[in-house]
Every structure is written in C-alpha cells, then in structure tokens.
Image: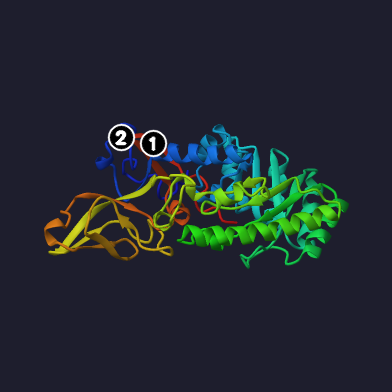
Amino acid sequence: MATTPTASLPLQDIARVGDRLEDIDTPALVLDLDAFEHNLRGMQSLAELHGVALRPHGKAHKCPEIALRQVALGAQGICCQKVTEAWPFLQAGITDILISNEVVGRQKLELLARMAAQARFTVCVDHPEALKALSAALDARQSFVDVLVEVDIGQKRCGVQSHDQAVALADQVARLPNVRFAGIQAYHGGIQHKRSFEQRQRAAEKGIKATAGYVDALRQAGFACEVVSGGGTGTAGFDAASGVFTEVQPGSYAFMDGDYGVMEWGEVMALRHALFLQGTVISTPTPERAVLDVGLKSTSAESGLPQVVGREGLRCTALNDEHCILIAEDPRRRPALGERLLLIPGHCDPTFNLHDKLVAVRHGVVEVVWPVAARGLSR
C-alpha cells in the first residue's frame, strides 16, 4: 500500500504530553493554555455583557479542538472563510457554521449543500446570479441554508454597494427555494488594526452607522434582520455595545499576535499573548548575530517580523524560507548555539496555516497536542 512521504518519516512527534517546553522539537507552534483560556473567557464575557452572540472565526486557528472549547464556553457557533475549511469543524461536531464569504463554483456549492444537510449553515451573498446558483445546488440535494446579504461598510472588498441592492437581494432570497433571508453581514477588516484606541473607535462608529442604515432600509422594505453579523477583534467592544450588531466575529482575540499587541486597547478588555513560535539557535556566525530555524515556512511576515519574547535588545531583522536572523544590541546577550527562544508571530491566522500541530502547554509543560486539521483547506 502506498504511503505519503510523511507517513514513514523516522522522526518522533514534535512533542508529547509531559514534555518540557524547552525539549520539544522546533520550529513549533506553541499555545499558552492559561493565557488562551483567559482570552476566551474575556471575549465571551464581553459578548454576554452586551447581549450579543459570539461567533469566533475558525480561519484564525483552523483547529476544531479550539472551536469546541469556544462553543463550550457559550459561543453561538463559528465562522469559516472557505467551504472546505468548514469540513473538519463539522466532522468534529460544530453544528452552527457561518461561511462568512461568497461561495461561487460548482464544486464548492455541491460540498456546501452536502454539509448543510448535516448542520445549520449560513452563507453570505452579494450577487443575484450567485444566489440563484446557491439555491439550485441546495435544491438538488434537498438541503437548506440561511442567507446573509453582505454589505460593504467601507472595506471595499465584497458586499452590495447600496440599500437598493440589499433590498433586491433580500427579495430574491424570499422567492427562491431552500434559502431563507436571515439578515446581513457587515464586516470592515481594514479598521481592526488601527493603532490608536480613539481612531479605531471613530472608524467603528462610522461603520456602525453605515450598518444601521442597511438594517433600517431592509426593515422598511419588510425584511427583518434577525442577524447583523460583523466586527473583529479590534472593534469587538464597540460593535457589541452598539445596539446594531446581534453577533460579533472576532478571531485573533484567542491568541493575539505582534500586530494586535502594539495597539491601544483602552479598558475594553485585557487580552494576553497566547500564541508563540519556538525556535532553536542553529548558527552564531558573528558576535552579534544568531540564526533560528524559524522562517517564512513557519511564520507569516506580512504584518511584521516576529518579536523575541523576554530578551531585551534582541530583535528579528529578517526572515528567509527557513531562517530567522536575530541581532543582539549587546553581543554579550546574543543567544548561544542550541538555545531555544520564543517568538510572537506578526499575524496569527496565516501562521496557523503553516503548521500541522499546535503544542498546548501549561506552566512550561506540554498538556496536549492538537492537529491543525483545516490547514491548507482554502477552496
């Protein structure tokens, strides 16, 4: 019987339960369970305080074990950005999934229709032809989904561009089989990472006002918006308190990353860094330079280079495919060959997508190793 190349790889697992953090293989994606659980409780409490549903983004971690813990704490369900991404979550027992994206293409629609026969699915639409194709695929399998009309509130990505377009799509949903109009999605990712608390608040308020305009227009046309979904980690506090959104869609909150870590958070909530990369120093070619076995195939860089944890005066200056270049301001503080270092990735979402396993630790000891089961599922 044929095997995959990795099936016969004569290496131990990256980590085993009971291993000390400093003894696991590298590069490794590491989750601090205490900080992670603190973040889950904090965002769930925020949502409950304002009476909105929490629907975390599965694309942030691609790990069903994490989603199950989010739902166990009270999350309504999860978001997935792609149809294939939803499959491992469905298989793990997540029964309420929003595909927070447009679904176009025969293969994707057939898979969606198959999954929708097994659990509650909600799908975003912004085009009448896409809506007709969705309805037809569902009708062929006799399955059903709720539909959110996606509206553009400033992201300039997907979404209808006017109140009239939103009303027309809602009306079309009402006339097609196997779909039900449930409300709107109003997401603005471009404002999630504004550094200043005040700037982010002003931008969120502008988006909330635009969202309310769509809700009012639809209601005046006779379409109740049962669901108004949107927001992210950066604006969750504003969106939850707005009285407009009925659910919020943060993802990075559970882990934080380098980009979110430099933002001003005010008193909304105190989130902690929970996600790290552990690397090993594999070279010390000059008095001030050290090289780790962590590179672009282990961490994302589009939101900035990773940050070294707990080592003042030591910074990452470059990433190559399999190398991270570190420079020590004081050569006496340069790490030694073989030393293990923790890094904070610049952006958690694409970093998760580079790893097969997530090593979850508590007090420096491996408690569990979870598969990143939706890794690479981007269709």
Element assignment for label 1: helix
Q: CA distance from mark 1 to mark 2?
A: 8 Å
All told, the count of numbered labels is 2
Q: Residue at 27% x, 36% y: name it.
A: 20
Residue under label 2: 363
Mark 2 crowd level (few <14, some 14–19, many ≥20, 10 Å Cα): few
Quadrant assignment for the C terminus: bottom right
Kind of residue at badge 1: Asp
Residue 369 lies, with reference to residue 281, above or below; the image says above
Q: Are marks 1 and 2 in contact (CB under 8 Å)?
A: yes
Residue reaching furthest right? 175
159 left or right, relative to 170: left
Q: Nearer the viewer, residue 95 or 347?
A: 347
The disc at residue 26 is none
The residue at the point 85 percent across, 57 percent down is 172
Q: SS at mark 2?
A: loop
Residue 261 location (% of width, % of height)? 40, 54
Residue 63 against residue 335 in the figure, above or below: above
Residue 11, horizontal then vertical, whole percent:
31, 44
Relative to 28, 370 lies left or right: right
Give the residue drawn at x 32%, y 61%. 322
* Residue at image location 75% in from the left, 54% down from the top: 215
Where is residue 235? Give x, y as percent.
55, 53
For disc 1, the marked residue is 34
Left or right of residue 310: residue 360 = right
Is 323 placed above or below 50 here? below
Q: Amino acid at mark 2?
A: His
